[in-house]
Image (cartoon, rainbow, N blue to C red):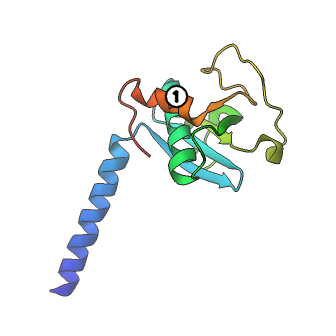
Amino acid sequence: MKTFRYSLAAAIIAASAGAAMAASNYTANQINPNVFEITARNSGDTAGIWCGASRYARDTLKASWQARIYVARTMGTSQVTGRKGAVQFTLDPAAVGITPITSSPSLNSFVVGDSQTIQMARKFCNQGITGGI
């Protein structure tokens, strides 16, 4: 009977984790110590990508609200999942050899070196139904 209870508990935990992922519009993966990747369910969901980057940087990496998130690799195929619509980010552009851009024509273009603060990027979380990581 104990095996059944543990199996049931594991199934409930797995189901709730799956539900959280199903409600999410993006996933996050750490690529290396300096780079993380956000993959959107819809590659046109640029707000969701910035939202995901801000949440991962703040909640997982514990970066300050004023820290800048830099685009480290433009939108392309995920290095982890192989899905399209992935953008890689860094908090330390010097560590990955990126020159920060002082101004960009559009935050939707994900130009390498473009950036915004975590606080600014978090505002994208309020633009629609972007879920958590």
Corner quadrant of residue 73: top right
Counting from the top left corner in percent of width and height, residue 91 is at 69, 43
What residue is rendered at 49% in x and 26% in y?
Answer: 47
**Looking at numbered disc 1 in the image, what kind of residue is underneath it?**
Ser
What residue is rendered at 78% in x and 40% in y?
Answer: 93
Which is more toward the observer, 83 or 91?
91
Which is more toward the observer, 77 or 133?
133
Residue 81 in view in this figure: no
* Residue under label 1: 43
How many numbered discs? 1
Which is more toward the observer, 1 or 122?
122
What residue is rendered at 55% in x and 28% in y?
Answer: 120
State the residue lying farthest toward the left: 1
Residue 120 in view in this figure: yes
**68 above or below 59?**
above
- Residue 69 appears left or right of 119: right
Counting from the top left corner in percent of width and height, residue 126 is at 40, 27
Q: Quadrant of the N terminus?
A: bottom left
Corner quadrant of residue 71: top right
**61 above or below 98?**
below
State the residue lying farthest toward the top: 105
**128 above or below 11?**
above
- Residue 100 appears left or right of 107: right
Classify 10 Å Cα crowding around label 1: few (below 14), some (14-19), many (20 and above): some
What residue is rendered at 61% in x and 44% in y?
Answer: 37
Counting from the top left corner in percent of width and height, residue 86 is at 59, 37
Counting from the top left corner in percent of width and height, residue 65 is at 57, 40
Q: Secondary structure at mark 1?
A: loop
- Residue 100 appears left or right of 31: right
